[in-house]
Image: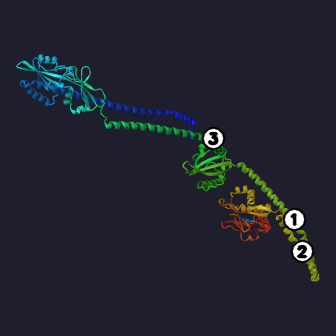
Amino acid sequence: MGLPTPSASRERISRWRWLWILPRLAFILFVGGVALLLWMSDRADKEERRATLISDILWLEQNLRFHLTRNEEVLGRIDTAHTVSGAAFESFARTVFGFESGLRQLIWLGPDGTVGQAHPITMDPSLVGDAGEAVPSRQSFRLARSLGKPVYSKAYPYFTNDWQFEVHVPVSREGSIVGVVVGVYRIRDLLGDSVPWWLAERYRISVIGDSGKVLGTRSKVESAVTEEGYQVAFDPPGWGLALHAVPYHAPRPLASILISASLVILAMIVLWSLWILRRHVQRRQAVEEQLQQEHAFRKAMEDSLDTGMRARNLDGEIIYVNPAFCRMVGWPAAELIGRRPPMPYWADDYLDETRAIHDRVLAGQGPEEGFELKFKRRSGEVIDVLIHEAPLIDAQGRHSGWMGSMVDITERKHADERARQQQDRLQSTARLVAMGEMASSIAHELNQPLAAISSYCTGAANLLRSKVPTTEVLPALDKAVEQAHRAGQVIRRIYSLARPGEGRFETVNLAERVDAALALMDNEMRQKGIRIALDLAPQAAVDGDPVLLEQALFNLLRNAMESMRDTAPEQRQISIALTCADGYASLTIADRGCGIDPGVAGQLFDPLFTTKPEGMGMGLAICRSVVENHRGRLSFEANPEGGTQFHVLLPLAPQ
Ligand code: ADP
């Protein structure tokens, strides 16, 4: 039963410590899984964007090809009527420029390469290449003329920023080349005309030369581009030109950001709760260890006690016994715990009494000052125990049962009993001696006056018989009266046994005398199960003989105790009240005994009056004598609660 020892619990804790790996592992797996998921989703996103980029740039390349091919066809269909006059050529050129061909200049070259027409005219500096190089290039012209099909020139710079290239489209009539129409494309303008806005918003589209130089760009915004772009050959015009598209940095979708953010928050919450949990468990472990140490300490303390401890729940079932209790009754704890009344250690001859006190304790009415009981050892030996019961309060402050502490007082009881018997014997011897002394003193003292009375009376009788005058009889009768007075004095002297010497008077605290008288019969009272209820004014002091006053109180208390011989045990109570009022100390001793028969009430204070077989009948007589000798009064009346109450009234000592 009970908690494990601290070392056992430490072992248990370290054995299960590896369990902490599980939540950590789960957390790492969770975070890893989340990161992987995010990475995969990002990758899929990137791949999708790349696939879109590729298809977009391929589409653009197709579009440009279609654009350039259509322009070739349009230029190839030039009517010779347009080539003879500048105005006709200009109108042709305007038509061509009109449908967003991307062309910026048209030149008509004769079969020998001479410039026939040009629009806009070549004097415009924008139509002349860098360093005044003649446009179009001769090489492309010759190639177109000899091949009889359109040929594109190499791209060449146009002023500092722009690049352009040409398309040389040979025009033949009836099988012979009549000239070449040269269309000049400015790369930047071509991109501007043929790249739709939606594409330009997504990508930065550039044309790149064979050396890697950027020859023209369609760029809507100057914002940063992210990943590397994608490049396809730009053919026509060929010559190593390439179309290059780089996607702009697209903002991540809000949903993806939200998911990532919530996953990160979730991971942090998990981490935080793990940390909190761990801290909580560590605290619990520390508290548990402390508790175990405390428990071990208490157990050691309990085990070393000589006082038996026994706890019962509210139903009277034993829930705990300490080793001292087991030693006391001889039953092991295992056989006692869980037992209900009657308990195996209840003495057979006292079962009813034990059961009654047991029920009183369970009902919360057990005597607070403790009580004595007889228990039976397993060996059958009966022992006396002094028991104190206290309510058992649990950790929640609820009353959960009763805790009893038991002391084996068998030895002490035996010693007390022996002492009491000794004292009883002494007392009765003393009484007998006193009685004998008193009887002989009465006999001796009364003998003389009685003999004198007898002889005076006999003399008087004889005189009367011999008919002497009455006057002669009178002296004899006077003498007889005198002797009768003397006999009265003798009787008073007997009272003086209880009469204190005048010089022995002192200030006596009555409460202290009551305590002293009670102490004399404490054992006997306890044995008879008599409770004492005290209500004493501590300051009540009288002038008197302390020994005699104590003796008087002792007599009254003894009478009260003896009157309750046949009273039920729970009724056995003596109430002692001491008050001060109007210059008097008033002491009341009330019992719940047999009471006083009205028929004998008048003789109660008479010497030698007794109703007890072993009584002497001097107690109350001496009491009254003592009290009156202290200028006080002794009286009695019936106790309204049953029994008798004696009142002692004594004048208070002057302050
Ligand atoms: P004793 O005690 O020797 O009999 P006491 O003079 O003390 O002599 O008492 C005389 C008688 O008075 C007793 O025998 C008893 O009958 C009666 N008596 C005294 N005190 C009480 C009392 N408290 N209750 C009932 N009877 C009492």
- Viewer-nearest of discs 1 and 2: 2
Check the image and report above or below for 81 versus 325: above
Q: Give the residue number, with chain letter if any, for mark 1.
A: 441
In the picture, measured across the screen, residue 397 lies left or right of residue 630, that is: left
Task: Answer yes or no: is residue 470 visible.
Answer: yes
Q: Which residue is mark 3?
A: 300
Amino acid on which the number 2 mark rests in the picture: Glu
Residue name at image x 82 percent, y 59 percent: 430
Q: Nearer the viewer, residue 463 or 266?
A: 266
How many discs appear?
A: 3
Quick check: 473 above or below 192? below
Q: Secondary structure at mark 2?
A: helix
Q: Which amino acid type is shown beneath numbered disc 1?
A: Ser
Is mark 3 in CB contact (under 8 Å) with mark 2?
A: no
Would residue 529 appear left or right of 623 to someone viewing this image? left
Q: Earlier in the sequence, mark 3 or mark 2?
A: 3
Question: Which label's residue is closer to the chain start, 1 or 3?
Answer: 3
Instruction: Kindly identify which residue carries mark 2.
Output: 482
Residue 123: where, in percent of width, then height? 15, 24
